Image (spheres, grey):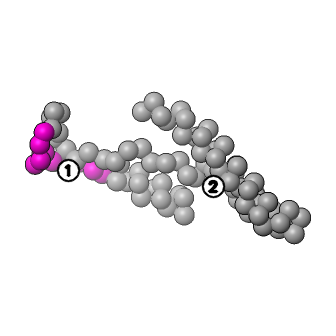
Amino acid sequence: MTSIYTGCFSRRWWIFPLFPAAPKLGPVYQNVTSMVPLWFPVLLIVPAFAIDPCAAADGRALGRLAIGDQAGVVFMLRIHLAQWPFADF
């Protein structure tokens, strides 16, 4: 699902600037000549690959809540490490 999300978002990011546009509501202080894409997509695919081993772990050893806690911590660490370099854009 994360790869589909990233692919669809990236396509919009590449296709939107191809269409001409003009601002219809004011005030616009920048000259806009083409459609402006949304922000850079969230890199959900990085934590998804890190969470897969957590989800595949044997649930009887840790319990479902412990696996969920572990997956949450892994998600937060990986999304932070993946998105931080792209914050400069």
Q: Which element carries disc 2, helix, strand or loop?
A: helix
Residue 67 figure quarter: bottom right
Q: Quadrant of the N terminus?
A: bottom right
Give left or right: position of 67 versus 1. right
Give left or right: position of 9 versus 28. right
Give left or right: position of 31 versus 55. left
Q: Which residue is mark 1?
A: 19
Question: 61 or 69, which lies in front?
Answer: 69
Q: What residue sits 77% from the left and 64% below the top? A: 65
Q: Give the numbered dot on residue 48.
A: 2
**Is residue 22 on the magenta stretch?**
yes
27 w.r.t. 88: above or below: below
Question: 29 or 6, which lies in front?
Answer: 29
Residue lying furthest bottom: 60
Residue 7 figure quarter: bottom left
| Disc 2 residue type (three-letter) | Ala
**Other residues around mark 1 within 10 Å, as few (<14) / some (14–19) / many (≥20):** few
Q: Is residue 48 visible?
A: yes
Q: Is residue 56 visible?
A: no
Residue 50 screen position, x and y as percent: 69, 51
Is the stretch drawn in magenta largely helix, strand or loop?
A: loop
C-alpha gap between disc 1 and disc 2: 33 Å
Residue lying furthest right: 61
Q: What residue sits 75% from the left and 54% below the top? A: 70
Mark in front: 1 vs 2? 2
Residue 30 screen position, x and y as percent: 17, 33
Q: Which residues are magenta?
A: 15-27
Residue 84 screen position, x and y as percent: 55, 35
9 w.r.t. 36: above or below: below
| Disc 1 residue type (three-letter) | Phe
